[in-house]
Amino acid sequence: MNTKSLVTLSLLIGMGAVLHTVMPGLFLGMKPDMMLTMMFLGILLFPNLKSVLLAGLVTGVISGLTTSFPGGMIPNMLDKPVTAVVFYGLFLLFAHYGKNTVGAAALTAVGTIVSGVVFLGSALVTVGLPGPFAALFLTIVLPASAVNAVVMAVIYPIVQSVLKRSNLAEPA
């Protein structure tokens, strides 16, 4: 992992933190986690285990610090590293598809669903949920999955083009 990739990951996670902070709560104070999209983008651009683990841990801490979910620090710190590793595994499994916009958006949708299930499950065990699991899954996780997929479909080709011109992306 070189300095350029660390700086790029930091910028992506920083942008994700801003998006996460300004996103309004939708249902019972819960909101879609836009940091996931930036974490997934970092994994797609720098697909190596060190970057994945670093992005997952840092995203978990920052997401936990900025969450509006009551007691959400611990579930976020559990959810993001697990999701990062699962997303990375899916990316490796479907590497051919993950390198285009549609594949990146599909992986983002699946990764967001994985994140939502892990977050809600760990929140249920550690602090409790403000509503039924199924209701939160249907009203928060599924819409967030669609929003994150659309956001990825818009920004992935732009970022890919910029990074190709600047030679920042590692060869996958």
Image: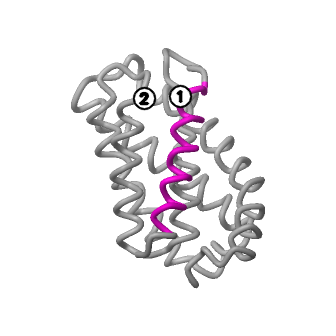
Q: CA distance from mark 2 to mark 1?
A: 6 Å
The residue under the point 36% across, 60% down is 54
Q: Position of residue 46 (x, y in %)?
A: 51, 72
Is there a contact, CB below 8 Å, between mark 2 and mark 1? yes
Magenta residue check for 48: no
Label 1 is placed on what type of residue? Answer: Thr
The mark found on residue 21 in the picture is 1
Residue drawn at x 74%, y 67% as measured from the top left = 162
Q: Which mark is residue 66?
A: 2
Q: Position of residue 40 (x, y in %)?
A: 54, 58
Quadrant of the frame with the C terminus: bottom right
**Residue lying at 29% horizontally and 23% vertically, measured from the top left:** 71
Q: Residues within 10 Å of mark 1 (few under 14, many from 20)?
A: some
At which x and y percent is residue 160?
71, 69
Compared across the picture, whether 132 is left or right of 41 comes to left
Q: Is residue 5 above or below residue 127?
A: below
For the magenta stretch, what is the residue range?
5-23
Q: Quadrant of residue 102?
A: bottom right
Please name the amino acid that badge 2 sits on: Thr
> Residue most toward the bottom?
171
Depth check, front residue: 160 or 154: 160
